[in-house]
Amino acid sequence: QVHLVESGGGSVQAGESLRLSCVVSGMTSSGYSLAWFRQAPGKEREGVAGQNTYGNAAYADSVKGRFTISQDNAKSTLYLQMDSLRPEDTAIYYCAAHRSPHRWKRFGRNDYAYWGQGTQVTVSS
């Protein structure tokens, strides 16, 4: 059974940084896709960044150059380094996974089968 547990959210000022972590368990295949999504109040859940176990990565235009997705396979952990945060980055951030390694560029909610419980990120101006 696949489990995803996020951590690292918090409240920061605009321009500051946060790093989110997601511990992944139960993904027994050698290749799979992981992603970060976010959902702000009253808005649809949107993809932020995706990566597969082969190192391919993709980003939403809104976060390119500010956010970095990475993995530590030894720790089975996915990270999202968020720099130069803006108030519009305020949302609940979710970690997502799929057993296919080919989903890393896809940011549709239905493209991922497994989800974490989310962690709140609040950026004030």
Image (cartoon, grey):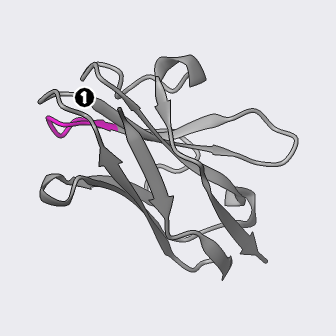
Q: Within the image, what quadrant is residue 85 found in? A: bottom right
Confirm whether residue 63 shows in the render: yes
Residue 112, given in percent of the width and then of the height, sits at: 47, 24
Main SS, magenta region, reads loop
Query: In this picture, is 50 found above or below 110?
Result: below
Question: Between 22 and 122, which is closer to the camera in this rendering?
Answer: 22
Q: In the visual, does 99 lie left or right of 116? A: left
Query: In this picture, is 48 found above or below 107?
Result: below
In this figure, which residue is indicated by the disc labeled 1? 32
Confirm whether residue 58 shows in the render: no
Residue 25, given in percent of the width and then of the height, sits at: 30, 45
Stretch in magenta: 51-56
Q: In the visual, does 120 lie left or right of 35? A: right
Asked whether residue 93 is drawn in magenta, I would say no
Residue furthest out toward the right: 42
Q: Within the image, what quadrant is residue 102 found in? A: top left
- Label 1 sits on a secondary structure element that is loop
Q: Within the image, what quadrant is residue 110 found in? A: top right
**Residue pictured at 76% horizontal, 48% vertical:** 40
Residue 17, given in percent of the width and then of the height, sits at: 51, 76
**Residue pictured at 19% horizontal, 60% vertical:** 75
Q: In the visual, does 80 lie left or right of 52? A: right
Crowd tier of the residue under label 1, counting other residues whose Cα lies within 10 Å: few below 14, some 14–19, many 20 or above: some
Query: In this picture, is 18 found above or below 47?
Result: below
The quadrant of the image that shows the N terminus is top left
